[in-house]
Image: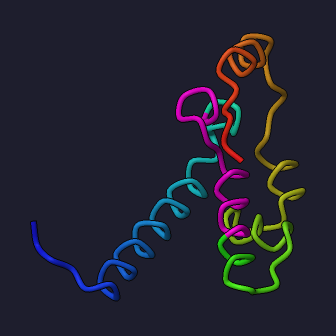
Amino acid sequence: MTELSKEQQTELEAAAFRRLVSHLRERTDVQNIDLMNMAGFCRNCLSNWYKDAADEAGLALTKDASREIVYGMPYEDWKNLHQGESTGAQKAAFEGNKPTHG
């Protein structure tokens, strides 16, 4: 394995994060509950982790601002445009696989 400097590692991680966010923005057909059920995290989790990182760095970032970074628009707008009503099966799967991460 190639040894990376801390700066290179950070740059690559940031690029991977940007690509993940871009992919999630493009895949509006994939509902958050489906992401939670399949992968154990969703767009909201990602935005919460982003906010946690800002908090740890002593940066002021609101929950709404971190969501807008991930969603590419205000969360309420995204929900109105792309989020459907969860089915009974989706809700049951979520209850059976509810993630424990914070």
Q: Residue at x 69, y 39 (%)?
A: 32
Q: Nearer the viewer, residue 69 or 63?
A: 63
- Residue under the point 62% across and 26% down: 37
The image shows residue 48, relative to residue 102, as above or below, that is below
Q: Residue at x 70, y 32 (%)?
A: 33
Q: Is residue 26 left or right of residue 87?
A: left
Please state, as top left, top right, bottom left or bottom right, where the N terminus lies in the image.
bottom left
Residue 13 placement, left or right of 98: left
Pinpoint residue 96: horizontal percent, then vertical percent: 69, 14
Q: How many marks?
A: 0
Q: Position of residue 101 (x, y in %)?
A: 66, 42
Tell me residue 43's x, y (percent). 67, 51
Q: Which residues are magenta?
A: 35-52
Residue at image position (45%, 75%) is 14
User: Residue 77, relative to residue 97: is it above or below?
Assistant: below
Residue 19 in the image: above or below residue 31? below
Residue 4 in the image: x percent, y percent? 21, 80
SS majority, magenta: helix
Horizontal relation, residue 66 to residue 28: left or right: right
Residue found at the far left of this picture: 1
